[in-house]
Amino acid sequence: MSINISVTKRDYGIDLLRVVSMLMVPMVHILGQGGVIGATVPLSLQYESAWLLESILLVAVNCFVLITGYVYYGKETRYYRLLTLWAEVLFYSIIIIIALKFIFPNEIGLEQYWKAIIPTFFTKAQFSRYWFFTAYVGMFLLSPFINLGLKHFTKKQDLSVFLSLFIIFSLLPAILNQDMAFTLNQGYSVLWFLVLYYTGGLIHKYEIFKMFKNYKWLLIYVACFLISWILRYVLDVSGLIEPGFNLYSFNCYLSPLYFIGGIALFCFFKKMNITKSAVISVIEFFTPVCFGVYLIHNNMSLAHFFFDKKFEFIAHMDPISLFISVILIGAGIFVVCGLVDWIRELLFRKLKVKKRFAQFEENIYLKFDKYLNSNS
């Protein structure tokens, strides 16, 4: 396998995966937070239909972080990117809480305002806000160390590290059905994001996507979610687990099946050769607003009033209608939130937010260098 240091052109396959992954996220939330799976009768056709869709979609978050590791491999860590994302988080946290204050004046108090100002610091379940961004911040701050290892490790060292990470943080937790001693929190953690970031870097460094033809990567992904779905069904029927979200090993991001499935889906999209201008235009429109889709629909204050348990009615549809309804509603949420975030994107461009943060970072470096030189 050859080593590749940089991407020379825009990778629309990866951009499309970014869009597809975020398209999946509202659907996952409809099934879980929205109450669809919880409202279905265990082992009914509706229950199995919902779990099949959940099994298909659960690679979304892993794919997102794999993309980050792949894209930033061989690149200098620029912290203005993190500041720009944080500005988006604060923008929506504050805007949404002010809007909700007008709609539900008696429900929004000082505590909600305080949490809106510092949304990423509340990590307990009852205060959870934007856990993905909280884990992403930790991963981003530690990414220079991962990049340094990726730059200097030999193939043998990379292979040893990857196998160790896979066994300790994915395979053993699945076999033992627990976090072990690392507090991985089923993948909702900085530690798991670092594993995914490193894996994404390896895919870039050794061009792993070239190992198989594209249809084989797709088959691996399909096999992973089908095996996960079947295993859960067998354990449900056998009575070894209680129906619902109780099987840690197969219903979380750490699962070896979702880890491998995420890698396979990433490689499938990476090998796509997208040339049609119409498709490229759609990708270019939605790629910048993907993070905004997450921030809007998953805002905890907004979700409390308009999302949590609000989709239980879907559980009473026939299995096919249930399957299709979740996809269509999830896609609708994605499009609406994407259009809203496009307004925010235009505003940020007008205010030159990214450019100002980049200049701020540059000024900090210049002043720091000047200080060091004056004291040397």
Image (cartoon, grey):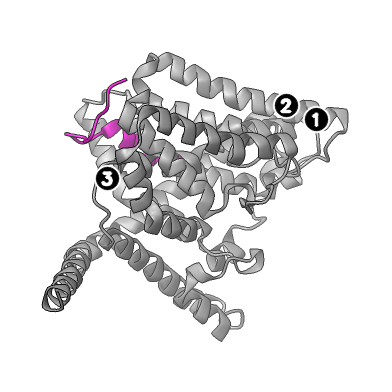
Q: Residues within 10 Å of mark 1 (few under 14, many from 20)?
A: some
Mark 1–mark 2 CB contact (< 8 Å): yes
First in sequence, mark 3 or 1: give its number.
Answer: 1
State how many labels appear.
3
**Left or right of 56: which side holds 10?**
left
Q: CA distance from mark 1 to mark 2?
A: 6 Å
Q: Position of residue 257 (x, y in %)?
A: 59, 29
Q: Which mark is residue 43?
A: none
Secondary structure of residue under mark 2: helix
Tell me the kind of residue under disc 2.
Leu
Of the numbered discs in the image, which one, if any, rests on residue 231? Answer: 2
Is 175 on the left or on the right of 131, as rendered? right
User: Which residue is under mark 1?
Assistant: 235
Point out the image quarter for the N terminus.
top left
Quarter location, residue 15:
top left
Instruction: Name the residue furthest bottom.
Output: 110
Hey, which quadrant is residue 171 in on the image? top right
**What residue range appears in magenta?**
1-21
Judging by the rendered image, the residue that carries numbered circle 3 is 285
Task: Choose the circle earlier in sequence order: 3 or 2.
Answer: 2
Q: Amino acid at mark 1?
A: Leu
Residue at screen point 38% across, 17% down: 211
Closest to the observer, 200 or 29: 200
- Give how far apart the Cα atoms at labels 3 and 2 are: 39 Å
Residue 241 falls in image quadrant: top right
Residue at x 73% of width, y 40% of height: 177
Residue at image position (48%, 61%) is: 134
Q: Nearer the viewer, residue 64 or 141?
A: 141
